[in-house]
Image (cartoon, rainbow, N blue to C red):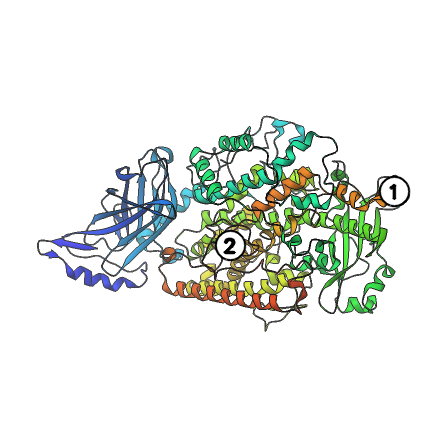
Amino acid sequence: MECRGRGGLCSTIQNCLTVFQGKVTANEDFSFNYTEKCFITAEIIIQGSKNHSDPGKSASLWLYSGTKIDPSTGKGQVSDKVHLNHGKSNKKNGIKMTAYKIRFNVDPGFGIPGAFVIRNQHKHKFFLQYVTLQVNNNRKIQFNCNSWIYPTHKTSMDRLFFSNTCYLPNQTPDALVGLRKEELSSLRGNGTGERKEWDRIYDYDFYSDLGNPDKGPEHARPVLGGSDLYPYPRRGRTGRPPSNKDHLTESRPAAISLDIYVPQDERLSPKRLSEFISNAIEATAHFVLPEAKLLFQDGSGHFKSFNEIRHLFTANRSQVKEGRFVKKVKDLVPEELFKMIQHARIKNPVKFPLPQIIAENEFAWKDDEEFGRQLLAGINPTVIKVLQKFPPESENGVRSSIKQSDIQQNLDGLTLVQAMRQWRIFILDHHDYLMPFLNRINAKGVCAYASRTLLFLRNDATLKPVAIELSLPTTSSTDEEEINRVFLPATQGTEAALWLSAKAHVAVNDSGYHQLITHWLKTHAVVEPFIIATRRQLSVMHPIHRLLDPHLKDTMHVNALARSILINSGGILEKTLFTNEISMELSSALYKDWRFDEQALPADLLKRRMALKDPDMPAGVQLLFEDYPYGADGLEIWAAIQKWVTNFCSLFYTNDDSVKSDNEIQAWWSEIRNVGHGDKRNETWWYSMTTLSDLTKALTTLIWIVSAFHASVNYGQYGYAGYPPNRPTLCRKFIPEEGTLEFADFLKDPDKYYLEMLPKRFEATLSIALIEVLSTHTSDEVYLGQNLSPGWTDNEQIHQMFKQFGNELKEVEKRIVERNRDPNLKNRWGPAKIAYRLLYPDISDDGFRGGITGKGIPNSISV
């Protein structure tokens, strides 16, 4: 800031301003007793749009003082209004960027700016990246905006931004208190009206938009959330009108729409969205379209050989014409986005490598050791647990039919009692939660069992499956409560073929659980209420909002797209998973058992007996055995996150009372518990949020879920599930009973029977296309611990802490590489020769890392 009077530049004001290099507090007064006019210079960076001109003079800004109150308003003093003019444009990574230099006239006593307002009177929206103010020769004030600015004729309001200085509520400068409250209030809305693209309203709703009863009764789905029968987390409200056939169900667009409402700042960037859709087009064109023509040809629905499945990934795979398909996509998206999609497809054509599971060893997926390894190092490594009672028993007291004599010979010389006492019998349990749904599932043309799989921990820490029990509900009035069949390991003949089929049915159960519970429910769904509450209750000035912001990016938009095409009635998951139309109902049933505190990695490991308490360890637990790749790498990531969060919070909260007295944090936590997860409000496990420890535990758990946990269960999908025989999503046949005609067919050609048991070609290729898209990193991915923008915060101590966090993750990378080189850690490679890298942070390499990499921990749930 400079002041000019009759004597020229007032250097005394510059001298005075040098005292403001530290933090501004609420009690500091920066008034000046001068009559000269002063000015503050600003640089505004706007991201250009291909078809729209820059806003120029149609956009105007004015500043609010953060230190000088206007007595007439009770808010910060206001500068003159300045219009943008004479912008200079250049291209950065192919994107047009326009920089404007402007000057604000302010009174000499204006003090330090704390906020600014921008008004867009242009015809079109524009993307504001950041604003930098120069208040003297040595100090800059940064505003990280990264927001769409919509025309005021649509929004009926201007847009307010605060600087990157963090304040707890009771430390807010008096000049900004009113603005802080008004901004939060404007984001909450009143729970009425249909939301429009330009709105910035965050509100809650039930999952009332999954069904489409207007399309027919077969598309009716229960509303999830708000009832004891169907509890569920809340999602962002769109306010669309109810359907004609059911007033409780929200109406849906007549055709697939990618334009579902989410608040403007939660939308995927145009670049990311274009890459995402481009990937989907390429995957669909490669895998699905060639199979679509087979839907109407008799006898062509199943794969005839394993070579046919492998052929799906060949470069010279015959393509059908894409014209109609591309035209449909063009009809779904705005013209500008479609052009970006076409450009992305040409510039970065998607390549489809062989899934890792068959890349090095084509038949490793059949190996029992590989089957066990994937429970520790695959894409669903959070279900396996130590068996505490033999035989296993259901919650209703029904015992498993697995006998001691079934497994005794496979315990490497130990007795069952010895193995149980040494915690060496493990169980993969997909029994109790499935049994109530099986009759409905199997009425839809699939053949599904509930399963229990017992495994033995060998001396080399590999898991050997020793028995599989497949169960069905009884279909007649008998004394038996369920029908059970037990299958035992075999390597030759008919028994080996039956064993392979039993493992396939287990994999079907595990695939469904992985997609609906581990992946969707425990990451995407449970996190959305945290995002909404953060935006509604924590000011952008709040340090915890600043901490969480990078970890909340894109998730609401991704979830909205999922409700449009994945988890809705007739969506991709219903078409590909064995759970078909009851998929989300099943997800609701398992939400009844969900606990936020148990999603903390140490708590999860302790619950499953995969670790023991050890206060001397960084994460407070010690793994039961070292060669558990997900657990070993995960605990190091967890400890690094925990340290970063603890250090960050300790900068702002000096004791427990400072947490209890933070009204925004208390409102945030109360809303998460009582509204966002309102169906679980009465659970006693919720943190009380009265101590600093409560806050750091909650934040560590949340950041773990959205970053490392999501990465570990998502980005390896193509490598493992991209090959249907390894992780089929449904079965079309039961395992035949001896003495039946089906068993005779099975004996005649076990491979043919197995292939006909797998998903049909179209189902399989649709599933492959989906997981290819889900497994792909976009080119602008930001990874955990990567350098954030210098404007993220003005607190240099935080920047140093974050740098230390990044360095610790780089050390974790080195230790992961070392473990992967250790030949004694067999589970880190296994028979398939797949190095465990799903929790490899991947921040050491600054080069291009988009595509299917099978590694990297993005900051947020961005796909």
Seen as rendered, the residue at the extreme left is 6
Q: Residues within 10 Å of mark 1 (few under 14, many from 20)?
A: some
Distance, label 2 to label 1, CA atoms, is: 51 Å
Q: Residues within 10 Å of mark 2 (few under 14, many from 20)?
A: many
Seen as rendered, the residue at the extreme bottom is 616
Hey, which quadrant is residue 297 in on the image? top right
Seen as rendered, the residue at the extreme front is 316
Pick whichever, 657 or 608, lies toward us.
608
On the question of residue 67 being in view, the answer is no
Residue 682 drawn at (x, y percent): 61, 51
Question: What's the mark number on residue 221?
Answer: none
- Judged from the image, the secondary structure of the residue bearing numbered disc 2 is loop
Residue 88 drawn at (x, y percent): 27, 45
Q: Which residue is mark 1?
A: 744
Question: What amino acid type is highlighted by mark number 2?
Answer: Pro
- Judged from the image, the secondary structure of the residue bearing numbered disc 1 is helix
Residue 688 drawn at (x, y percent): 55, 58
Q: Which residue is mark 2?
A: 858
- In this picture, residue 596 sits left or right of residue 203: right
Q: Above or below — where is 29 with respect to 263?
A: below
Residue at (45, 52) in percent of width and height: 549
Pick whichever, 301 or 807, lies toward us.
301
Seen as rendered, the residue at the extreme right is 739
Number of labels in the image equals 2
- In this picture, residue 30 sits left or right of residue 513: left
On the question of residue 568 being in view, the answer is yes
Q: Are marks 2 and 1 in contact (CB under 8 Å)?
A: no
Disc on the earlier residue, 2 or 1: 1
- In this picture, residue 700 sits left or right of residue 755: left
Residue 341 drawn at (x, y percent): 47, 39
Residue at (82, 66) in percent of width and height: 416
Question: What amino acid type is highlighted by mark number 1?
Answer: Ala
